Image (spheres, rainbow, N blue to C red):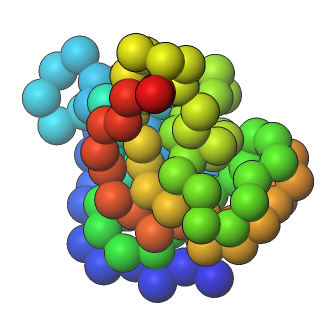
Amino acid sequence: MSNPGLIKAFTTGGAVTRRRLVKFGAADATVVQAAAATDLIIGAATELDAASGARVSVVLTGIADVEAGGNITRGSLVTADSDGKAVAAAPAAGVNNRVAGVAMVSAASGDIIPVLLAPQQIQGA
């Protein structure tokens, strides 16, 4: 269950699916769906899908509901897969990953899970 803090509306620079992680788009005040562990993730889209050029609400702080893209153990740091879904962040040695936050519950692919948003970057050891 989400417990959002700051929610901000952005214009989409491409289609954004609900409950997916997002990053800034090519222009100011735009977002696109995140598509890699290296994307500069800023938050999660809320409960409505948005077409390209439409407005989308993005949870920037607090706890957001995000769709899982694989098995995740509660407490794990999560990042984005190629579809903007949350997956466990597990960078190889010397590789950087951007992190959206911390999974609040364990999940399997397709589950909607609460993620405590805490964008950051980690490096594999």
Q: Quadrant of the N terminus?
A: bottom right
Q: Is residue 70 left or right of residue 16?
A: right
- Compared with 21, 3 (above or below) is below
Q: Based on the displayed image, in which of its 4 quarters is residue 69 positioned? A: top right
Residue 27 can be seen in this image: yes
- Compared with 42, 123 (above or below) is above
Residue drawn where x is 38% and y is 22% of the image: 96
Q: Is residue 111 left or right of residue 3?
A: right
Name the spot of residue 60 as percent of width and height, x first: 30, 60
Residue 44 can be seen in this image: no
Residue drawn where x is 29% and y is 24% of the image: 25
The outermost residue toward the left is 28
Name the spot of residue 35 as percent of width and height, x first: 54, 22
Residue drawn where x is 55% and y is 79% of the image: 2
Front one among 46 and 53: 46
Front one among 87 and 21: 87
Name the spot of residue 22 as percent of width and height, x first: 43, 39
Name the spot of residue 57 as percent of width and height, x first: 38, 57
Q: Quadrant of the C terminus?
A: top left
Residue drawn where x is 63% and y is 29% of the image: 81
The outermost residue toward the front is 125
Total numbered badges shown on the rendered structure: 0
